Image (tube, helix red, strand yellow):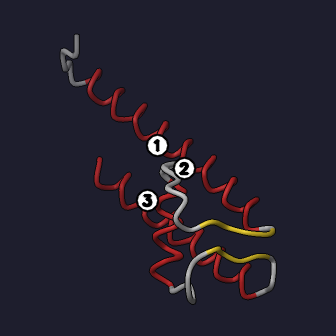
Amino acid sequence: MLSAATVGQMLSAAWFAVSFRISSEAGLGGFEIEGQISWMDTYYFSLVNLTTLGLGDIVPTGHLKFLAGIEAMTGFLLISCSASHIFMIMKMEGYDYE
């Protein structure tokens, strides 16, 4: 069950990374980073942002800041729902967590 949640979150990060790339190429914004941003840089930024870690080594500019905010809210909800689901499973199985 835990691995399905992790895979789902990684797919969400990939979806947002594609959205960042398309939006960037459409001229809606970009990223503050030395040199040209690669696909892996975009995916890395998306994973960091989805987990709401926010390291700040890659910074969105323009309208991509709004998309980054939406991604952070989505990530917070995904993590919260996953934790709630795991807690419910543990409670149903009688796990003594006290």
- CB-based contact (under 8 Å), mark 1 and mark 2: yes
Read off the residue under disc 1: 79
Question: Is label 3 or label 1 in front?
Answer: 1
Residue positioned 62% across, 56% down in the render: 71
Image spot of residue 31 (x, y percent) = 65, 75
In the image, what residue type sits under mark 2?
Gly
Is disc 3 surrounded by few (<14), some (14 to 19) or many (20+) residues within 10 Å? few
Secondary structure type for disc 2: helix
Taking depth in this image into account, of 9 and 92 the one nearest to the observer is 9
* Cα gap from disc 3 to disc 1, whole angstroms: 11 Å
Read off the residue under disc 3: 8
The quarter of the displayed image where residue 84 is located: top left
* Cα gap from disc 1 to disc 2, whole angstroms: 6 Å
Read off the residue under disc 2: 75
Q: Disc 2 or 3, which lies upstream in sequence? A: 3
- In the rendered image, the residue lying farthest to the front is 34
Image spot of residue 50 (x, y percent) = 52, 55
* Cα gap from disc 2 to disc 3, whole angstroms: 11 Å
